[in-house]
Image (tube, rainbow, N blue to C red):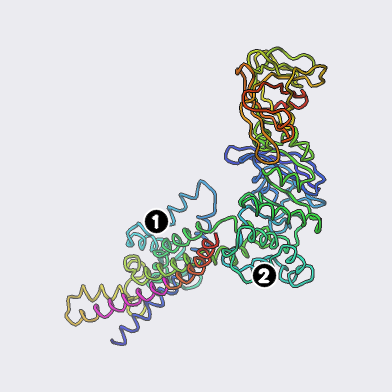
Amino acid sequence: MFELDLQHQVKGFELSVELASAGPVLGIFGASGAGKSLLLNLIAGHVKLDTGRIAIGERVLVDCAHKISVKPEARKLAYVTQDALLFPHLDVQRNLCYAPGASTMLESAEGKRLLDLLRITHLLDRNPANLSGGEKQRVSLGRALLSDPAALLLDEPTSALDAGLAWEVQSLLLEIKRELRLPMLLVTHRVSELLALADDCIVLEAGAVVMQGEPISVLRSPPTSGIAKLSGVDNLLKLSARSGSQGSSSSLAFGETQSLRVQLSGVAVGESVSVGIHADDVMLCLEVPRGLSARNALRCTVREVSARGESALIELSPFDSTGPRLLSRITHDALAELELREGVEVFALIKASACHPLLG
Amino acid sequence: MSADELSIIALSLQVAALSTLASLPFAALMAWVLARWDSPWRSLLHGVVMLPMVMPPVVTGFLLLTLLGRSSLFGSWLFDVFGVSIAYSTLACVIAAGVVGFPLMVESMRLALLGVDPRLERISRSLGRGRWATAWRVTLPLAWPGVIGGAVFAFARALGEYGATIVLAGNVEGETETISLRVMEAISSFRAEEEGVAIRLVCVSVAISLVALLLATWLQRAQRAKLLDVNQAGARDV
């Protein structure tokens, strides 16, 4: 579906992407400045590619080696941005009919079904600035879909909206995906959006693809600290190696007296290692555990208990207060049974495989 | 007002209108290049385009005469092949007025174009509209107040043009004698009866310029109000 092999430089920033994805919805995940929007602009043809090849489905859009570069207007890639970017001098109907052939399509049964799907039939004679953020984005999606695109390019389509409107637009995108089966390239830094919509996902960092895979596996094992932060990893620890690697695992200093075992080889003594641990992966126990398969049982003291929402977040520090803080997420039932409160000593149980070594 | 004075006013209006209309497409193109062309040469080009605005008009006229006069390479070719002589003709008035008003028109349009979000143009292209269709359907309507403003400034400047015109076109009665030239002639004659001619032509010149500026302001305001209305309504919604 999506085949990209490209290199591009702009103002000292270098973007280098090589990927093949069956899609149909490919998520492009990464922090601000990673090159996500530049990649989308190169695919759309708004920025001229330095070297490489871009193909979507059977269509080769750019092949620098063969001097092929399809003009943006002929690529049939409808672009939807975070600001909706409706034409301010045209009302909603004229925005929707902007693309060649769109007015005919709007009159058709398919067009009317699309308006119903997007819930914008009642907005046709309104001016763009009289619309709410969600309405604008729905009209923007309608305008894109009425241009009869071969694929949709979505550049953070919900990031300018508040949580409620973002959920509304996300649900709509899901319906579009299900009903229209249109290939989509989705640039996002919202985890929920990535999980809900993308079938495949790449992670961009500093202009390079650092990971590709199913969204759930990418978010589960983020490759770098930056991506770990974005994907909501609760514990980002920077620890130094206590001893050299032994086989496939290493021992990192967790305070002065305890160690955290992680699955990482080739680490020298004293080397600094970043580790990401999901709070859900930190179990708590009131007594010294015995016969345990998990490699880490860290003696800690409860510093704070936050029991808001669907679960409780427990903040821990090593019992001798010499190491970093650690977060554990447990159920309210577990919190009540363990009677956790500030000052209680517990053991934090963490599997070595749940400690994700991070780059950077 | 005498028939001579009426014909001078008519010629001035004709010259100003023709120079403005002829400059419009070139100014629009130049403004677009200066607003959108991402190149280190852009500043230099901008400087060159702005030159007639800061140079003494007489110098501009002299340069034009050097380029277009009968003794120049282009002027002699034009005369030999087509039998046309630009210097000291109505066309020379139009060219002089056009060149002097060109930077005003370009600058007004350039600033208006810079106010148009380039992402709207990108969206238009991705929706299947080509470069020219995008310019016509998106860029021009949004930059319209600047286009009108630029055209009116250039028209007013052309109406008052003297220095470049006197060098390139001279003061030929019925051919190149515009309001400015006739007013200057009347003043420098030191004759009492000429004073009335100067005053009448100055009044007409002020009136034409004022009407043009008011018309431009009204058109700009109407266009801006359309967008502003929309924006204020949007702000209320928020």
Identify the residue shown where x is 74% and y is 40%: A202
Are discs 2 and 1 located on one and the same chain? no
Q: Which mark is residue A122?
A: 2
Q: Nearer the viewer, residue B205 or B108?
A: B108
> Range of the magenta residues?
B198-217
For numbered disc 2, what is the local secondary structure?
helix
Tag 1, which chain? Answer: B
- How many other residues sit within 10 Å of disc 1, few (<14), some (14-19) or many (≥20)? some
Label 1 is placed on what type of residue? Leu
Residue A338 drawn at (x, y percent): 72, 28
For numbered disc 1, what is the local secondary structure?
helix
Identify the residue shown where x is 35% and y is 77%: B208
Q: Is residue B192 left or right of residue A222?
A: left
- Residue under pointer 1: B51
Q: Nearer the viewer, residue B132 or A102?
A: A102
Q: Check the image and report above or below for B72 versus A66.
A: below
Q: Is residue A360 visible?
A: no
Residue B195 drawn at (x, y percent): 20, 79
Q: Is residue A59 visible?
A: yes
Q: Quadrant of residue B214?
A: bottom left
Disc 2 versus disc 1: distance between alpha carbons? 53 Å
Residue A102 drawn at (x, y percent): 72, 67
Q: Which mark is residue A344?
A: none
